[in-house]
Each structure stands twice: as structure tokens, then as C-alpha cells.
Amino acid sequence: MPPLIIPVAIIIFLFLASAIKVLKEYERGVIFRLGRLIGAKGPGLIILIPLVDKMVKVSLRTLAMDVPPQDIITKDNVSVKVNAVLYFRVIDPAKAVVEVEDFMFATSQLSQTTLRSILGQADLDGLLSEREKINQELQEIIDAHTDPWGIKVSLVEVKHVDLPTEMQRAMAKQAEAERERRAKVIHADGEFEASQKLSEAAGVMEKHPTALQLRFLQTLTEVAAENNSTVVFPVPIDLFKIFFEKQTKN
């Protein structure tokens, strides 16, 4: 075997290894030829010109990025810590490589500044109760800014709002006071309805005195059902008035 065959074989192998690339289904290769962009290729087999073409591999899968906790002062001057999660993916690999130096870092910084800006315009009650509206607003703003980079932001979710300890105690007291207020209102409404019914019942008994006697006898029956106690009831004279009237007539 001639001595030059082995070096030539090694050169051919290295040439083919640098020229042939295989990309997965979710990957795209942005090709630069002598520094000029010629487009994105893939998936599958890609043949490059060694020493002339350079490929930058980009993933098209949806990425989940954790937005670090941000110190935010709300519209009503409450200091809170808020973190979020961002879901996005690359829809234009060429723009993601050419238009921005590091789209991951740029998207992360943009999400942090947008989070502080938007939540700083909301008060604490709105931040806690209108979470869906805030998420939608964050998604629209971040997506509009990342669109020139070939990035599509599909979802932004505020995960946790960390309140100061004194604010948590104040909100707990407020919630307890609100529950007590509702309980008192419900109790007052019940007393008012009961008083109306009692007033109507008193009117009926005033027109029909016999109804009062029947009610008295019904109460005696209910008390007599309890065998473990002895109850002494004074008998009203009016109960026997009807009998006295009959004897007088006779």
C-alpha cells in the first residue's frame, strides 16, 4: 500500500464529515456562505462546502423560560416580588440568528423589563384578581417586540406574587372583617324577616283569639314530649273564658 493512501483517506474522511450534516425534525440549519446568509435548511441531510459554508443550528421546539423574581412597586405603592414563566419558540431561524446576537438572552431581558413595567401600572388588588388579563397583556407586548427576531411568544404566566409579611397580615384581617360583616348582614336580614312574620302572626292571633290558645296547647304538647324534665306552666284565665261564658248563658 503506497504511503500516501492513508493521509488521503483521512483527508477525504474529514472532508465528508465537515460537509455532511444531519438535522433532526425539530432542527434547522442557518447557512452562511463566505459570511453571507443563503437561508435555512433542514431537516434531514445537508451538504456543506467545507471552509466555505458555516452552519448555525437552531431548535424550533417550544422553550419554557423562567423569569427571575422581580422587585415591583405597584400603583398603590406596595412592594412585591413577582416571578413568571414564558413559553416561546423560533418561527424564523434566519431572523433569530441574524437580527439578534443571542435571542435567548434578549428574550429573557425583555420579559423581565416588561414584567416590571406592566405590573407597576396595576394596583395590588388588580394584580391578585385580574391575573388572566395581565398575562394576556404581557404576552401581547413581549410577542410584538420579539416578532422582528423571528420569535413567537405563545404564553406568559405570572406564577407567584410574594407579599410582605405585614401586608399578608393586613389582608387576612381585611378578609376576616369582610366575613364578619357578611355574617352580621345575613343575621340582621334573618331577624328582619322573622320580625315581619311574627308581626303577621300577631295580627292573625289578634283577630282570632282561639289561635293563641291553640298555639299555647301546641307548645305544651312539644314540651311534654321530653320525658326527662318537668315543666310548670301557668294556665291563663283566658283559656277557660269560653267555658265561663257558656255557664253564664245557661
Image (cartoon, rainbow, N blue to C red):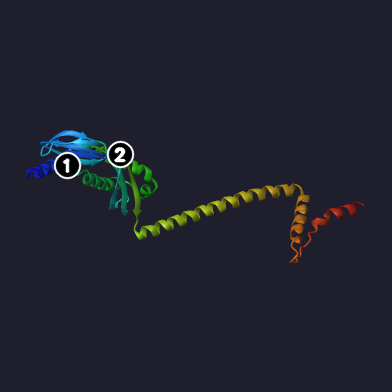
Q: Amino acid at mark 2?
A: Glu
Q: Is residue 180 left or right of residue 54?
A: right
Q: Is residue 148 visible?
A: no
Q: Residue furthest right?
A: 250
Residue at 36% x, 60% y is: 166
Residue at 42% x, 57% y is: 172
Mark 1 = which residue?
Answer: 17
- Image x and y of residue 98, in percent: 17, 38
In the foreground, 43 or 90: 43
C-alpha gap between disc 2 and disc 1: 44 Å
Note whether 232 is above or below 40 in the view shown. below
Q: Residue furthest left?
A: 3
Mark 2 = which residue?
Answer: 140
Q: Is residue 56 visible?
A: yes
- Image x and y of residue 139, in percent: 31, 41
In the foreground, 165 or 233: 165
- Image x and y of residue 130, in percent: 38, 45
Q: For marks 2 and 1, give the one nearer the viewer.
A: 1
How many residues crowd mark 1 within 10 Å: few (<14), some (14–19), many (20+)?
Answer: few
In the foreground, 18 or 205: 18
Q: Which mark is residue 136?
A: none
